[in-house]
Image (cartoon, helix red, strand yellow):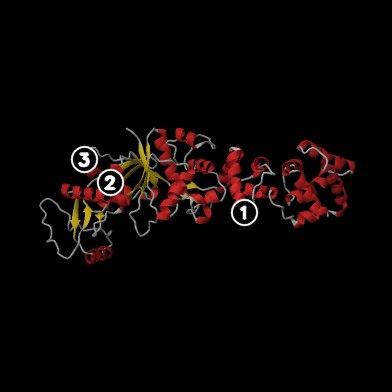
Amino acid sequence: MIVRTRFAPSPTGFLHIGGARTALFSWAFAKKHGGTFILRIEDTDVARSTPEAVQAILDGMKWLGLDYDDGPFYQMQRMVRYKQVLQTMLEAGSAYYCYSSKEELDALREQQMANKQKPRYDGKWRPEVGKTLPEVPKDISPVIRFKNPIDGVVAWDDLVKGCIEIANAELDDLIIARADGTPTYNFCVVVDDSDMGITQVIRGDDHVNNTPRQINMLKALAEIDSKIIVPQYAHLSMILGNDGQKLSKRHGAVSVMQYDDDGYLPDAVINYLARLGWSHGDEEVFSKQQFAEWFDLDHITPSAAQFNTEKLNWLNNHYIKTTDLGLLAKDITRRLANRGVTVTTQVNIKDAIALYRDRANTLNELAQSIAYFYSKPQLDEAAKEKHITTDILPVLNGLATQLADITWTAEALHAAVEHSVTSNALKFPKVAMPLRVMLTGGAQSPSIDAVMAILGKDEVLARIHAVLS
Ligand code: GLU
């Protein structure tokens, strides 16, 4: 059987981390089996769906590199098809018109609640052999209900959660088309999954309750058309925040594009999501392609996964360290421009990045840490007071004179600082620290000769003299 999976977001908000993981797992399952991954936009909730949210989903998928083989399909563009299937089901007797008024249903519900019964439709308009239906009222536009089996159970072997079984008696005759003729959510999903030949439905476990209803409808459709299959289902557990609570905005429930803004690389986010509730031995660091080769539904943890920002940062640092410098340079140039810092050719940005990338958890940190190469730093007052003491000024003056005449290489610069240290009988930091504050603005940086080598002679001397004069 050719594998066909889908990601079916409702465009009522951005693509968040949970949705992205669902998309990634569906993508990977299709890739692993040489199948097809479909994107379907479930936009029938017109009041809550927006074009901006559709765009945000498409942008998020693109940023993550989750390419789909088919789609995007939009449910709103498939109305004719849904109505056609409704008609077929009415004709086959697996769906029926229900004329119960809202008042009638409200009264029924109240009565059932008063009797401590579970509120449910009483089957008034459900056709049965030998049953005479009430006379059709003239003033009521009917809804269409699915004729759910009354007896037996609906069961499926969930590929994540194991066997799940629900008694049909628990399920109502679901409304599948409203009085205005528009099809309802579960019905559209069923028609789409069957039309699109979906073989595995991989989705969040907030949909577990929908699955028995959807399976029953698919079975009813399969009776009409034997080519229709009931897919396998894999329900992914939810993702909890760092604090073990429901994912909140502070703890990851933000758009995946926020991760871009915050300085995360898509490869790091993908790698992180892949490990969120799935494992392959002790492997922690792997590419999207590697993930697609390894991915299986057997190694998904049925319990909730917990978001861990530290781990994401660790992975992001790994990818920052290993990503091509040219790509990083482009990204960091953009981030610096957003901060009003223009990258010029005087300082080779790749060298600056190479010097700092080991210590950056995010691209924003990296941009921040190399900004001083391109704009004069604001000197940290405490560091200035501590390190740029009056006794050291003559030494720095002497060093500056010496620097003016040397060949500008890290080795020669190191030798010059070393010479200034020894000839004045000082310890290395006594000279290196004030220099660091003058050049970088703060007391922390990689080796000072490497910083000077990248910053260039003119700028180094200008910054030293700006403080000395
Ligand atoms: N549209 C649903 C959602 O965004 C997903 C439906 C499904 O995967 O079956 O939650």
Distance CA(mark 2)–CA(mark 3)? 12 Å
Q: Work out how far the residue at label 2 is from the one at label 1, CA to CA, in angstroms.
A: 49 Å
Q: Position of residue 68 (x, y in %)?
A: 40, 41
The circle on residue 408 is none
Give the x, y percent position of residue 156.
Answer: 31, 42
Q: Are marks 2 and 1 in contact (CB under 8 Å)?
A: no
Q: Which mark is residue 225?
A: 3
Amino acid type for the residue under numbered disc 1: Arg
Mark nearest the camera among 1 and 3 is 1
Of the numbered discs 2 and 1, the one sitting upstream in the chain is 2
Q: Secondary structure at mark 1?
A: loop
Q: Splitting the image into 4 quarters, where does residue 402 fall?
A: top right
Residue type indicated by callout 2: Val
Q: Is residue 404 left or right of residue 326?
A: right
Q: Nearer the viewer, mark 2 or mark 1?
A: 1
Q: Is residue 70 left or right of residue 269?
A: left
Please tell me how crowded label 1 is: few (under 14), some (14-19), or many (20+) other residues with Cα within 10 Å.
Answer: few
The residue carrying mark 1 is 339
- Nearest the eye: 344 or 203: 344
Q: Indicate the position of residue 37 as horizontal and vertical percent values.
A: 38, 39
Q: Circle 2 sits in a helix, a strand or a loop, which is it?
A: helix
Viewer-proximal residue among 365 and 77: 77
Q: Residue at image x 46%, y 33%?
A: 294
Picture coordinates of residue 288, whole percent (x, y): 49, 37
Q: CA distance from mark 1 to mark 3?
A: 60 Å
Q: Amino acid at mark 3?
A: Asp
> Along the line of sight, which residue is nearer the eye, 24 or 146?
24
Label 2 beta carbon less than 8 Å to ligand 1: no
Dot placed on the residue nearer the N-terminal end, 1 or 3: 3
